[in-house]
Each structure stands twice: as structure tokens, then as C-alpha cells.
Image (cartoon, helix red, strand yellow):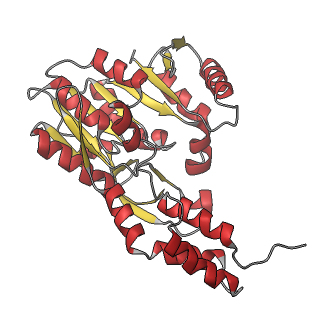
Amino acid sequence: MAKSPYADTEDVRYAYRLLLGRTPDQQGFDHYARLVGAGTLTPSEIANAILGSEEFTSRRNDQERPIEVALNGYSMFVRSIDRDIGAWILRNKMHEPHVTQVVRNLLRPGDTFVDVGANIGYFTALAAYLVGPDGKVVAVEPMDKNLQLLYATIFSNKFAHVEIHPFAASDVNGLLPMETGFGTSNGQVILTGARGRLPAMFAQARRLDDMLSGLSTIRLLKIDIEGYELIALSGFAAGLARHRPLLLTEFHPKCMRENSMIEPEAYLSMLFAYGDEVQVLHENGEQIACRDAESVMREWRRAGMRMGGDGTNHLDLLVRPR
């Protein structure tokens, strides 16, 4: 027998738990139970009513309100609704410990750090603290909801040596289609042919060679832009040749294929042309030096098996220029 399209009292309880994070109060439950009893209320109508309630609006506003998090010697701003990064930092005062340790090991006072795909600014703030006022930090981030947290962090810490470019890094200047989601600070460039529908949002794109032309040196360049890394670094060919920075990059084969229509081996080929080896930084702290693309792919598959083997995992890679 097909399930009725109309709601029952279990749908009421589920909607309260999902949208308000609590069980129904008696008055609210009785109200919806009367409507359910009439047999004309659908689950989506219950959801829409709760989404329009003052309680839901207030709860969402609280979750989206910037929260200052004290770290070791500085602070940054997050939102509790950001399940991927902000909520983690709020709980643990840390993000990606294995990458954090590498950044701490590599940066010294006076260094220059470039953060491409800065997100809400965890590594931007960390680097600003490490390089100090005699150093330089450049953050590249296109999404306004993240930029506002970045701005708050810079203002609060008086990081005068941090420069922000509110753009997406690419190989040409122009517009790029992007997607993000509710409850996450992550976003990604989605090339039109990859999804075949009108993009949810757009970002102004700029070449890194243009944005970073004023820098005299770069010690470390970190890039984490959900599979668009190869295209973005193609717009920094002159800068890579001039500065020869250390590269700290995310390697996400699924995002490369689905978002940017790039085979991961193409990105690895570029990295091995830049340095003699690629160091894989596993989340458990293990660091593996790889001399060819197949070795990196093997480490990616090995890491994926630890996470269930569905191919959605990424690696963090460090490349030293030759």
C-alpha cells in the first residue's frame, strides 16, 4: 500500500527534532495534531510552518552569529552552524592538526604566506601570528559569508600585515560559477559543463599572477579550493617560476573530476614537474614521500579505505621546489 501524502503525528515529532532540535512542546504538538487529524496537512506544510516561526529564525540567527574563539596567542571568528570547520574549531580550538603542525614548522617571523581558498581564515590567522608584523599574509577567498569572518579576525587582532583579495583564483580574469550550502563554509567552483544547470552563485575570478604581483618573496603557498587547484595555479605560472614557494595543497580526486573535469593525474603531473617528490600528510600524522603519481594515488586509496572506501576522501600534500 502506498504511503499517504498527508502527515501523521510522527511527522510532527520528526520536524521538530530536525528543524528546532527538540521534542514538541505540548501546545505546539496539540496544534499540529488537530490539523493532522483533519487529514489535509502534508509533511512539507509542517516544515514550512516551522521554518517560518520566530523560534526557528531566532535559532538560526544564533547559529550564524560570529563567535570569537581564543587560540594560542590570537583569536578568530567562527559560526557554530558551520559544521565542517567553524563548529570543529569552536569545540577543539584546532583545525586539521596534521596541516597545522606543518605550517607551524615551516613559517618563521618575517616570512610571506599565501592562503588560496582561505575559507573563514584559520590558516590565515595562524600564519599572521607566526610571521608577525614583519611578515606578510595574503588571503584569497571569494565568498562573502567567509570574508566577513576574515575581516572580523583581522580587525580584532590588529593584523595590519594581512591583505585580503575577495576573489576566486583562476587562470583568467572573469566570472566563475560556484556552489556552497547551508550550514557549511565550504564552497567550490563548478564549471558549467560539469553540472549542466544554472549556477547557484558567481564569484569574480582573478589570476594569482595579477593578485600577487607586488610580493617580493613567498615562503609558503597553501591552496585548498575543492578540485580547482590546477586551473588556479595555471594562472600563477610566472609567480611560481619567480618565487619557488613551498606548496601545501589539497588533493581531492572526486572534486577534480566532478567540479573541474580534471583527472587527478594531471594535477600530480604538474606537482612532480615542480618538485622531485610529493610528501603526503596523512591525518594520523604519518608523512610519506612519493616519487611518482601512482605512489600518491596509492596513498589516497589507502587513506580512503580507512574512511570506508567510497572515494570521497582527500589528501594534503607538501611539495618542495627543485
Task: Determine which quarter of the picture holds residue 195.
Answer: bottom right
Q: Is residue 125 left or right of residue 189?
A: left
Foreground: 316 or 239? 316
Q: How many marks?
A: 0
Vertical side of 287 occupied by 7: above or below? below
Q: Quadrant of the C terminus?
A: top left
Task: Determine which quarter of the picture holds residue 47.
Answer: bottom right
Foreground: 61 or 308? 61
Q: Quadrant of the N terminus?
A: bottom right
Asked if residue 216 shows in the view, the reply is no
Q: Which x, y percent locates residue 212?
A: 24, 40
Q: Which x, y percent locates residue 102?
A: 36, 19
Q: Which x, y percent locates residue 38?
A: 69, 88
Q: Is residue 63 left or right of residue 4?
A: left
Q: Which x, y percent locates residue 245?
A: 31, 24
Picture residue at 38% right of the left edge, 62% below the top: 60
Picture residue at 37% right of the left edge, 36% below the top: 91
Picture residue at 44% right of the left edge, 76% below the top: 52
Picture residue at 35% right of the left edge, 24% below the top: 100
